[in-house]
Structures are given as C-alpha cells and as structure tokens.
Amino acid sequence: MQPVRQKDKLAMNGREPGAVTGGRQRVRGRLRRGPGYAVLAALLVAAAASGCAAGDDADTAARSAKAQAGQPGAPAEPAGGALGTRAAQAERARLAQAARAVAAKKWGLATTPLAAPVPPAKKPHLTTRKGFEVSGQDDSLPPVFTRVPTTDKVVFLTMDDGDDKDPELLKMMSELNIPYSAFLTDYLVRDDYTYFKDAQSRGTVLGNHTLNHRYLPGLSHDEQKREICGQQDILQEQFGKRPRLFRPPYGNYNTDTLKVAKSCGITAVPLWEAEAFPDHMEWREEDRKLHPGDIILTHFRGKADWKGSMPDLVRSVMKVITDQGYSVARLEDYV
Ligand SMILES: [Zn+2]
C-alpha cells in the first residue's frame, strides 16, 4: 500500500462519529488514575475531535469524513483551510490513534484497537449467502448475509436485543472510538429508550430486531408483519429514523419474513459469522478465525446473563479482533 494512501486511510479515523466526544470524557474514580492522566486523555480526545461539528449525527460525520478523505462525491471543503491539508489530516489521525491508545489503557484493553480504513466510496454489492436462500428466492428480496464482500481487513460489531443497559459500555465505546450497530427488540428496550438515544447520539445506528423476539417462521404473514413493521414504526417514532437493516431473532426467517421486511423499508438482513461472549467466541466456520468483512454478533447482556460485564465483553472480543490484525469498521458504511 502506498504511504500517502495510508495517511488518507488513517485520517478517516479522527472523523468518525465516536471521535466527537470531547465533552463527555470522564475518568472513573475506581480506576484511580492521577489527574495528569485525565487531562492528557481529555486533551488528546479534544484535539482528535477538533474540526468536527458539535452534536453532529452519524450521517453528517460520515460525510465529513469522506470530505476529509477527499473521496469522490464528497462535499467540497472550504478552500484554503489548513485543516484540509494532508499534513493536518495525518496529524489528526495520529492524535485520534493516540487518544485511542490512552482510552485502551484506561479501559484495560490488552492492545490498542487498530484504526479502520476509509470506507469504500461505493458500497459493495450484496447477495444472499449460498444456502441461506428462502423458497421463491429472487433478487428483489433483501439479501441475507454473514460477511460483507470487501478486501479491507475490517470486521463489524453488532449488538442485539437491548436488555442490559450499562452506561459504562456507551462511554467505553465512545472513548475507544469503536463503531457498532445495535439491533433492538422493543420489549427489552422500551423501559429505557433514552439509553439507546444516547448510543445513537454517539454514532451507533439502530436496527430492527422485532417487537417481541419471536421465532418468526412459526408466525403467520400478518403476525410477522406486526413484529417487523411494528418495530420499524416504533424505532422511527422513538429515534427519528426508519432502519434499513433487520436481523431476525435467532437468525431464523422464511419467505414471508423477507417479503414483509422489504415492504416496510428493510434493504438488507445481516446475520453473523461469529458470536462473541465475555469468555469465548463461537464460530460459524470451521477455521475458527476472522475473515475480511465478517460480521460479529454479541448482545447487550450483564453479569446476570453471562460471565462478565459489557466492558469485559468488549475487552475480550477486541483482543480477538486486534490480535488477528483487524479493525472494526462501521457496518452502515459498507451496507
Ligand atoms: Zn436476539
């Protein structure tokens, strides 16, 4: 890879939504870090985020990132601004990664997560994975896939259901600047929509995981419509956006599922290649390792459900990802 291109790729990192968190930095007392550490972390993050509009949403941040990366079709940067120069981009990327290294130490990660490359200017063409077709399958139905076709050494992190609502998770992911997508089931999240509004404001895109987490192939067409389209309506009402991505509970679906999902605005059905737990991974493939574009599933769960907290889960899965040389990219930048 050419060095200049690498700079461009690194430059992306400081512009991702999660980087815009300068005002939210806080060092937890129980970590017993000195005040110098807190000041350094805050300065690094503020520096990395400088130039970003405050309070922007994920789309704005992504457009901004593309503009910074000089991608085709990106809005033009104001002429003559020093921030638009390649050297400034590289410096911003360096600061963003330095801030991530500080956050990785703070949160007890074994190694600093790698910086994700600039997302593709054109999203890859998705097709349904072989063996995952439904009867009467045709190209008009949303594709069902477990891996995104890409040669980038990236994987995608997705969190399902929404039962556990650990505030530490939101802070940790923001400070580490690691993107993830949340697939929400209404009956588990409706007691606290504000938690997921907070996640959304930090750049997480919210997807559909049905109203009640039923086994969809066991439901009639109309019942499935209520489960899927009813959740589309609630997510739009609560969070202001109608999801494009849908994940059926347990990964189970039939022809009605895909037809119904399409009818209420779903364009793609991402399943997963691997599932992360706080103490182990479960793999779909026999080689038991990551591949470019793999989608990783995990859940919003707490110590009552499995062997650890959400920060424990993140530490565990990020070790697997980083040790294998992958970065975490934003699913919606590729799908
Ligand atoms: Zn689920």
Image (cartoon, rainbow, N blue to C red):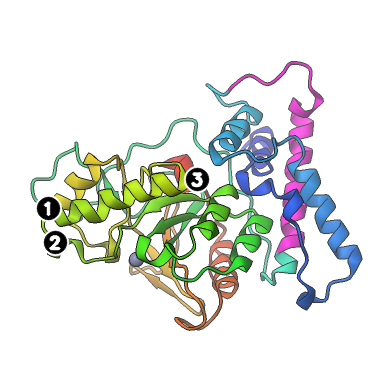
Q: What is the span of residues highlighted in magenta in the rendered image?
A: 75-103
Measured as percent of width and height from the top left, residue 302 is found at 51, 77
Residue type at the position of mark 3: Asp
Q: Residues within 10 Å of mark 3 (few under 14, many from 20)?
A: some
Cα separation between marks 3 and 1: 39 Å
The quadrant of the image that shows the N terminus is top right
**Which image quadrant is residue 29 in?**
bottom right
Residue 77 sits above or below residue 257 on the image: above
Q: Which of disc 1 and disc 3 is earlier in sequence?
A: 3
Which residue is found at the position 24% from the left and 56% from the top? Answer: 227
Element on which disc 2 rests: loop
Report if residue 280 lies within the magenta region: no
Element on which disc 1 rests: helix
Q: Residues within 10 Å of mark 1 (few under 14, many from 20)?
A: some
- Residue 185 seen in this snapshot: no
The label shown at residue 219 is: 2
Q: Is residue 257 left or right of residue 295?
A: left
Cα separation between marks 1 and 2: 7 Å
Q: Which of disc 3 and disc 2 is earlier in sequence?
A: 3
Observer-nearest of 280 and 297: 297
The label shown at residue 152 is: 3
The label shown at residue 221 is: 1
Observer-nearest of 206 and 277: 206
Measured as percent of width and height from the top left, residue 288 is found at 40, 69
Measured as percent of width and height from the top left, residue 88 is found at 79, 33
Residue 328 sits above or below residue 61 on the image: below
Residue type at the position of mark 1: His
Residue type at the position of mark 2: Leu
